[in-house]
Image (cartoon, rainbow, N blue to C red):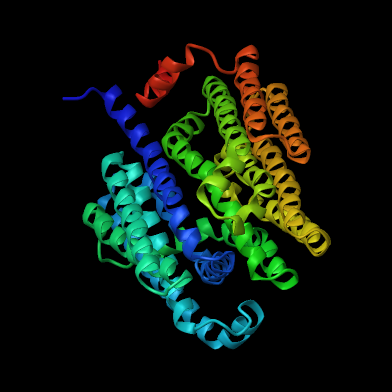
Amino acid sequence: MPTTKHRFLTSVLYYTAAPFLRNALTFLTLPVLTRHLLPEDYGTINLITAVSMFGTILVAGVTNSSGRFYFKYKDKDDLLGSMLFSNLLFMILSSLLYIFFLTVLFGLINNQVFHGNMSLSWLMVAAAQYLLIYINSTNQTLLQNMHESRGWFANEAAATISYVLLSLGLVISTDLTWQALLIAGVASETLKACVSFTRVRHIYRRVFSWGLLKESLLYCWPQIPSSILAFFYQYFDKFAMNRFKGMQQVGILDMSNRFGLILKMAMDGIGGALSPVTMDLLTANTGEARGKLAELQLKVIAVVLMLGLGLILISKELIMLLTVPAYYEAIRVIPLYIYYHVFGALGMISYWLIYHNPAKTFYQIPINAFGLLLSTAANIVLIPRFGLMGAAFAMFLSMGILQFAQLVIGFRLTPLPLDKRKTAVLFTLMFAETGFLYYIYGLNMSHIGEIIIKSVMFSLFPAACVLMRIIEKKDLSFAYNLAADKFNRQISS
């Protein structure tokens, strides 16, 4: 029988293996997909996602409530099951209501967003897909909270593999383009829903409770305005690019973001492994616990920035290897778009500092309102004049300021003794190396020369981490003990 240490280490491996599997399969298929799909096709699917996703913002909030209140009711089976069932029913009814409004407003949406080239049925299919995504997110969160990492990974793997195989099959064997990606997405989420419910259906109770639903809504309502603001923050540049430059440029932005998702998926794996530990340390609410959390978060920042820098430095080679010349415009855009997720390292720290206490969730509204205003102004000014690079720089500027502001507010609400000097040095080094990379691109050097210089540039970052003693040899055993849940036990000893 495996020890507790090995069980927790296995959980960490599962949580990090899923995003890497998703990345590997997704990018291995790009050489095929980009030879059948134009940038316009990726632009279309991106805007379909935006229109469909907007209606599930409230659903996403209830999903967060289900994960949060699991810990409150996990020892009360009937209340937990009733809460989950009530939230599920609300999610379904909310999505149906949005589909109704989508039908009523379809003419306006079709003309303004899709230039009259969209069918209502495809938008309905996409709306159904996003309902399934958030239902699956609820069930996957339950499995994480129950430490059922193997079942969690099996669900993720089944959905990923089915999506890749079906999308490839449809694109190669039919005349479908972006429609193939949408069909594959719905099918894979349906499969994931079926297998995930087989693992968690014993938790649900078919008893509706208005009181429990009200509690979930009261928890998530402060997140709704901020989620709406975050939605427009995420997609305004795509809508603006479509209006000023056309759908082809939207596709280039989408492809740039897809390469940035490599880092996001790695961060999701890290977050999935560390969220329970973070919650335990915040719940302990002692000086020692917060000190250990600050030390851990600094190491996480270093790892995320190191991964981000590595991805930035090889992004040109990845584009040339995995796509066709129609997508090469993304080479100069991708480094700045990766910063959307690099700055997310600050969000990983501040998120639970704000959200671990339901009374503090309101603070997310002014944060995202400020970010939206800044992003909108930057996009309006920069996109008409600079196109793709204008959109990329607007994202870089607004996301950096937004995440820094959120970090400051998070520290005000839940102080942590994070080493600010070392954090600033890490970000400064990364900014400097990114700027030097653009300088290299302007020199039109030989490909081999670029690779040699990039290798030296990358080695500087881990060297700096070692010199500042952010990462040490003992961190190998530290990570192992963290995975084994010893980190939490050391606090109470």
Q: Residue at x 34, y 24 (%)?
A: 484
Q: Residue furthest front?
A: 446
Tell me what residue is drawn at x 51 percent, y 39 percent: 267
In front of the other: 472 or 251: 251
Identify whether 181 is placed above or below 490: below
**Height in image: 215 above or below 260?**
below
Q: Residue at x 62, y 33 (%)?
A: 309
Quarter holding residue 145: top left
- Say whether residue 381 is visible: yes
Q: Is residue 131 left or right of residue 325?
A: left
- Residue 102, x across and y down, in percent: 53, 81
Vertical placement of 57 versus 488: above or below?
below
Q: Pick the residue in front: 414 or 300.
A: 300
Give coordinates of residue 157: x percent, y percent: 31, 49
Image spot of residue 432 (x, y percent): 75, 30
- Image coordinates for residue 473, horizontal then vertical, percent: 49, 11
Left or right of 263: which side holds 427? right
Asked whether residue 82 is in view, the answer is no
